Amino acid sequence: MEDLTPILFGASAFQYLNAACDIGLLDLLHEKPNLSKDEIAKKLNLQPRAIDILLLGTNSLGLTEKKEQGYVNADVIEQLIAAGQWQIFKDVVGFEQHVVYEGQVDFSESLKTNSNVGIRRIRGSGRDLYHRLSENPHMEQAFYNYMHSWSELSNPLLWQHADFSNVKKVIDVGGGTGVNAIALAKAFPHLEITILEIAGTVPIARQRIAKAGLEDRIHVVHCDMFHDHFPQGHDCVLFSHQLVIWTPEQNIELLKKAQDVLPAGGKVIIFNSISNDKGDGPLMAALDSVYFAAIPAEGGMIYAWHQYMEWLDAAGFKDAKAIDCEGWTPHGIIEATK
Ligand SMILES: C[S@@+](CC[C@H](N)C(=O)[O-])C[C@H]1O[C@@H](n2cnc3c(N)ncnc32)[C@H](O)[C@@H]1O
């Protein structure tokens, strides 16, 4: 039965993590390890019952530890901080709390109806989460902090493993804040990149690109990937963290649009989390699928490798190559040629 406890009370486990980040417990213990309970309570301005609860949870979950001299962070938290990934991790926590948490309640209903019932928890009239973000500034900030961090964490895999050596001009479909375009432009000085984005996100991307001083090589175009044509004159189309959002039918449609504008020999590159073909993991792929099924758009998930291969085939691509990145996140890359 003990194995079931973290699942049965999984929502509470996440709330301890969120509180430990939000209230600043883990930052405090990094700066000042070995504090007593009273000292922590004073610094965090918490009443005795509140600090009792918080430390009971974080100690039980292995986020903090009580040593003889006082309380310290668990090794895994200190390792994240040492690796320079702590802010990235906190941005993911913020996304789970402010964007994912409420809508997940509708997961079961979303499965029964094969649609994203959880979108009803996101205020606004836009047709999907992305078109509602500008109507919810607090959520928009949590979303793009997360998306930027998540891509910053994972995109070294993209420029280290995908082959951009013979590519000149890339379309980055739904390129978000421009985080991947900026990383690619820095890694490959010969590349030019065109980001396609919705109206609400164009200024966010342009601002980040200007800050990186890359306006001459990265262009942001207002383009609805479903309703507008992809621009001509590019030899590579990148879908990063994109095909997890949409249904299989929509993914084939998007891959066909890429096929239509690429020259012979042009490339499509898919980069996102991927689940295994056996259908039993990785665990993060399964857990992340709850969000994609319940909230952002009609229906996506962390799809399996074989599904991407089938869609590429249906869209007319050949020589598909799968690259499993084998990291903490279940990222993978698939490249194929027209
Ligand atoms: C999950 S984010 C991925 C962002 C970026 N590719 C990355 O890897 O960091 C999906 C992006 O697709 C954009 N998007 C959603 N629907 C779109 C549409 N119809 N046309 C163009 N972009 C769209 C969103 O605004 C959002 O920035």
Image (cartoon, rainbow, N blue to C red):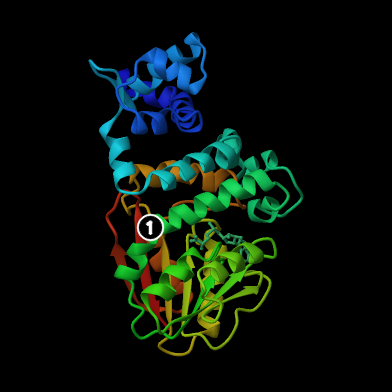
Relative depth, front residue between 313 and 284: 284
Number of residue marks? 1
* Mark 1 C-beta closer than 8 Å to ligand 1: no
Q: Few, some or many C-alpha atoms within 10 Å of disc 1 (few <14, some 14-19, many ≥20)?
A: many
Relative depth, front residue between 115 and 168: 168
In this view of the protein, can residue 304 be seen by the observer? no
What residue do we see at 67% from left, 75% from top?
A: 228
Ligand 1 lies in quarter: bottom right
Rendering coords of residue 124 (x, y %): 75, 47
Rendering coords of residue 123 (x, y %): 73, 43
Q: Residue furthest right?
A: 125
Answer left or right for 120 relative to 316.
Answer: right
Q: Amino acid at mark 1?
A: Ser
In this view of the protein, can residue 67 be seen by the observer? yes
Residue occupied by mark 1: 154
What residue do we see at 49% from left, 9% from top?
A: 49
For the C terminus, the image quarter is bottom left
Q: Residue furthest top?
A: 49
Rendering coords of residue 273 (x, y %): 40, 55
For the N terminus, the image quarter is top left
What residue do we see at 60% from left, 49% from top?
A: 141
